[in-house]
Amino acid sequence: MTMKLFIKELKRKPFEVKASTRLMMAATKMQLDQANFEKKIHEETKELPDAEAGAVTMRGMLNTMQSQIDFVTDTLKLDDNLQDKLVDLEPAQVSEIAVYITQRLMGMSDEDIRLSQAENEAGLAEK
């Protein structure tokens, strides 16, 4: 099934992406890498001096950002120009794009995603 992904930060026209097992595996790997990031950092740094622990943490953050960039680049088949646009975005924007792609691959529509975001924002406002 081919999906149209609307990512205005990169271009006006939608990207057409085939929802394949390969892409689902790549999305799952990226999510696992991110989920294990904090645990791995804690385990690797608990007995290190602060300076070394900071370096390990920064290396982990760099790996996480690169994982997201690689996932978005490969999934959308970005050319050099669009990849430059991607890496010039704020890290939070790159993360949002990666999450959006993953949600769409998991079968959510753009409307489902908007509703989910509105519910999350409403829940945060109540706290």
Image (tube, rainbow, N blue to C red):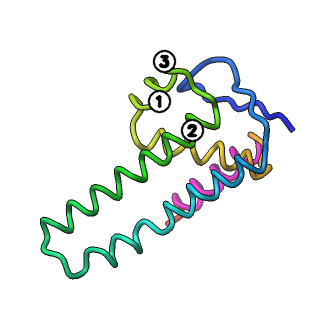
Of label 3 and label 2, which has the lower sequence position?
2
What residue span does the magenta drawing correspond to?
111-125
| Image position, residue 57 (x, y; %) | 28, 62
Q: In this rendering, is residue 18 above or below 56?
A: above
Q: Residues within 10 Å of mark 3 (few under 14, many from 20)?
A: few
Quarter residue 66 falls in: top left
Q: Amino acid at mark 2?
A: Val
Residue 89 left/right relative to 7: left
Of label 3 and label 1, which has the lower sequence position?
3
Q: Residues within 10 Å of mark 2 (few under 14, many from 20)?
A: many
Q: Which residue is mark 3?
A: 81
What label sits on residue 86 in the rendered view?
1
Q: Residue at x 52, y 58 (%)?
A: 125
| Alpha-carbon span between mark 3 and mark 1 | 9 Å
Q: Residue at x 74, y 40 (%)?
A: 110
Q: Main secondary structure of the magenta part?
A: helix
Residue found at the very far bottom of the displayed protein: 47
| Image position, residue 59 (x, y; %) | 30, 56
Q: Amino acid at mark 1?
A: Leu
Between circles 3 and 1, the one closer to the viewer is 3
Disc 3, disc 2: CB below 8 Å?
A: no
Asked whether 49 falls inside the magenta stretch, the response is no
What label sits on residue 72 in the rendered view?
2
Secondary structure category for the residue under label 3? helix
| Image position, residue 87 (x, y; %) | 41, 32
